[in-house]
Image: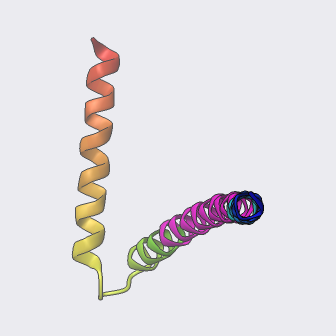
Amino acid sequence: MSELVEIVDSLENKVSKLLHKMELLLQLNAKLRNDLELLKEENELKQNALKEWEEKYDSLKMANTMLGSNSSKTEAKLKINTLIRELDVCIAKLAD
């Protein structure tokens, strides 16, 4: 009978340790999920900042081209033509 009690005690002890370990892992998992969300938000902010800087760079490049730089005249002409086409489409839609 004492062997049975020892086996039950041993099982209870092991189950208790497993439950404790599971609780620790659940807490760690929650912390990692939270960290992941924070990193995703930070990444999104950095991606948005990068987009803004790329737009500023393109604007500066275009301004430089329009000021007489020979390096990108073709690119400037293409951009102007694209803008004119977009304006034509908008005007056509407004006329309808």
Q: What is the magenta range?
A: 26-55
Q: Residue at x 28, y 46 (%)?
A: 84
Q: Position of residue 52 (x, y in %)?
A: 56, 65
In x, y percent, where is residue 27? Answer: 75, 60
Q: Residue 30 sits in which quadrant?
A: bottom right
* Residue 35 included in the magenta stretch of the image: yes
Would residue 8 be found to the left or right of residue 79 on screen? right
Q: Residue drawn at (72%, 57%), measured in percent from left and top?
A: 8
- In the image, residue 60 sits, relative to residue 40, either above or below, namely below
Nearer the observer, 68 or 35 = 35
Of residues 67 and 22, which is closer to you in this image? 22
Which residue sits furthest front? 1
User: Residue placed at 27% from the left, 77% from the top?
Assistant: 73
- Lateral position of residue 74 relative to residue 31, left or right: left
Q: Measured from the top left, where is residue 74 in percent x and y?
A: 21, 74
89 in magenta: no
Q: Which quadrant of the structure image shows residue 9?
A: bottom right
As displayed, is residue 71 above or below residue 27? below
